Amino acid sequence: MGIEDEADRTLFIRNLDTRVTEELLFELFLQAGPLIRTKIPKDSDGKQKTFGFAVYKHEVSAPYAMQLLNGTSLYGKTIQVQFRTVNYLLI
């Protein structure tokens, strides 16, 4: 499984509150299917960014998770979930 294959199984999650942890994101996104990992990047000062990623084991889980979890409220913020590849197109 290469990086291109992983892109089809990866979701981009934005508008995360700084209190959201990778563990919480993992537990939430696990509801839609088996996950490999979640990741919330940090800036150069070590502060958590307001976006993250969820990588699924199976490609079919990603669109299901997007439908299921887009618009979920975490710590009063509504998360937005989209395919990772869409994020690249916006750059």
Image (spheres, helix red, strand yellow):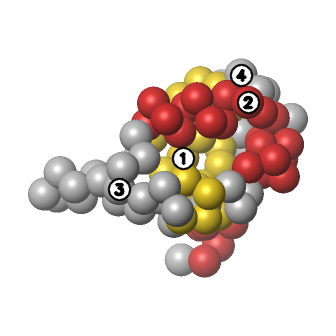
| Residue 55 placement, left or right of 76 | right
Res. 35 image quadrant: top right
Closer mark to the observer between disc 4 and disc 3: 3
Residue 75 against residue 40 in the figure, above or below: below
Mark 3 neighbour density, 10 Å: few (under 14) some (14–19) many (20 or more): few
Q: Distance between the Cα atoms at labels 2 and 4?
A: 8 Å
Closer mark to the observer between disc 2 and disc 1: 2
| Residue 75 placement, left or right of 64 | left
| Residue 39 placement, left or right of 88 | left
**In the rendering, at what x and y percent does residue 59 appear?**
80, 35
- Disc 1 designates what residue? 53
The first of marks 3 and 1 along the sequence is 3
Q: Nearer the viewer, residue 68 or 91?
A: 68
- Specify whether residue 32 is in view: yes
**In the rendering, at what x and y percent does residue 25 appear?**
53, 39
The first of marks 2 and 1 along the sequence is 2
- Specify whether residue 4 is in view: no
- Disc 3 designates what residue? 18
The residue drawn where x is 73% and y is 57% is 70
Type of residue at label 1?
Phe
Type of residue at label 2?
Gln
- Disc 4 designates what residue? 34
For mark 4, give the secondary structure: loop
Type of residue at label 3?
Thr
Q: Nearer the viewer, residue 91 or 61?
A: 61
Residue 31 has which mark? 2
Closer mark to the observer between disc 2 and disc 4: 2
For mark 2, give the secondary structure: helix
For mark 3, give the secondary structure: loop
The residue drawn where x is 52% and y is 62% is 76
For mark 1, give the secondary structure: strand
The residue drawn where x is 77% and y is 33% is 32
